[in-house]
Amino acid sequence: MLQSLKNTWFFNIRGDVLAGIVVALALIPEAIAFSIIAGVDPKVGLYASFCIAVVIAFVGGRPGMISAATGAMALLMVTLVKNHGLEYLLAATLLTGLLQIGAGYLKLGSLMRFVSRSVVTGFVNALAILIFMAQLPELTNVSWHVYAMTAAGLGIIYLFPYVPKIGKIIPSPLVCILVLTGVYMYTGMDIRSVGDMGELPDTLPFFLWPDVPLTFETLAIIFPYSAALAVVGLLESMMTATIIDDLTDTNSDKNRECKGQGVANIASGLLGGMAGCAMIGQSVINVKSGGRGRLSCLTAGVVLLLMVVFLSEWVSQIPMAALVAVMIMVSIGTFSWDSLRNMQKHPLSTSIVMVSTVVVVVATHNLAYGVLVGVLLAAMFFANKIGHFMYISSEADNDGTQRSYNVVGQVFFSSADKFIAAFDFKEAVDKVIIDLSRAHFWDITAVAALDKVVLKFRREGTDVEVLGLNEASATIVDRFGVHDKPDAVDQLMGH
């Protein structure tokens, strides 16, 4: 028990605590901004970020991954808040949590194995672009002081690690925030700070049951939003978990993460927060700042709450330029630059899937759409490629009265037409043997193709013998095929 606690919580105390502080500082303006996007009070996003981060630290399946209020989720809440108010948003958050827990028990997290590497790369690149684009409002129509502070922040982030002794001990993003805040407070320059984003809460969160009628009408209102929130939340969390797995060279429990996200969202809804999910930007900040264990996520949530409630006067003095510099660092570090270099080396289909995922995500600002397009394209390219891995040879006997066809490869919806076209139905032979011992039939389209071939030969007066079906193929052919059943021709013709 003690060894397990040490391995998951206390094996990297200094790195986790310092990384958690950096993440907490970066979470504050984002939580406020996402609250504004959703149309709710800033404290809703801040309470959600605190609650989700703390709970997921205990119940999540990916140590070192940061979960909180996110922009992808906030965009889905706008209409619900506008039409029905905050109470319905809290109810939808609770239902989102229940749906995600159900997804965890149904082991839907395992579906991540169907997401190809090119889709993950496209997802990562799109998020990097979106993170950078989200910083542009802070760099548009501003004084030169903002550009100078942002440039200074980037200089500190990238150069501080080269400082002897302390460069590798203290996370450079934390140094950036502290130094630029000191400069801002000392000079009093006229630039935006965290305090200008919105009013910070001055009380701890408290239990809050949504004040909505428990009726089917309420369920009808919130269910579409909850379903969308659950899907996008799990999708972003699973993709982020995969990325953090790669960055840390460790594995995570995706199904446990599904359940954990659900529990965290239920807790958030009961404490007056909105639904959230894993944050790739903050997770990358955490990992690059030295965070690896559950303690980093717990520290981020606790420090966030302590700062906004008890140190709000100091936190409000953090210049937005410092946080913009940190997020630009995140976007640069998140983008897969190798994917650009590899576009010439990788197959064209891989590059098309990656670029399509990026374009759709950036155009719609909806991660689910981009990943869906990427997965569908990857599946289509895969099916087309496998469809070509089928070969049919034939040979006639010495007297020309019998021909044997040998089928090698996969027969399914993509290769069914090629399968049919390989047979010569006009050849005058008494018997045809179709050897399927090196072939596999996958679906009813393949079975229908076999039916069509056999019945076409029979219609020409040719005797047909099908040999060598493996057990799996024989099962599907016996169940759905008609060529070996009475009145087969009539069934095929629809009589």
Image (cartoon, grey):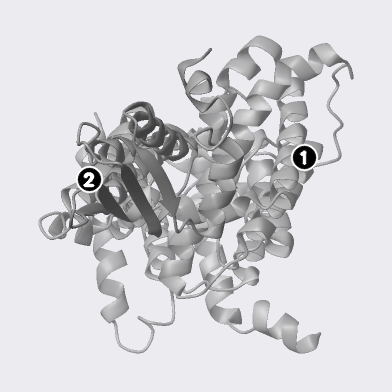
Q: Position of residue 357 (x, y in %)?
A: 32, 40
* Mark sitting on residue 255: none
Label 1 SS: helix
Looking at marks 2 and 1 on the same chain, the residue that comes earlier in the sequence is marked by 1
Q: Residue drawn at (44%, 33%), measured in percent from left and top?
A: 448
Q: Residue drawn at (51%, 75%), measured in percent from left and top?
A: 250
Determine whether, in the image, residue 443 is placed left or right of residue 17.
Answer: left
Disc 2/disc 1 C-alpha distance (Å): 45 Å
**Pick the front one: 47 or 204:** 47
- Residue 315 lies, with reference to residue 86, above or below; the image says below
Which mark's residue is nearer the viewer, 2 or 1?
1
Q: Position of residue 457 (x, y in %)?
A: 34, 33
Determine whether, in the image, residue 164 is placed left or right of residue 483.
Answer: left
Which image quadrant: the N terminus?
bottom right
Let me know if residue 31 appears in the view: yes
Q: Which residue is mark 2?
A: 147
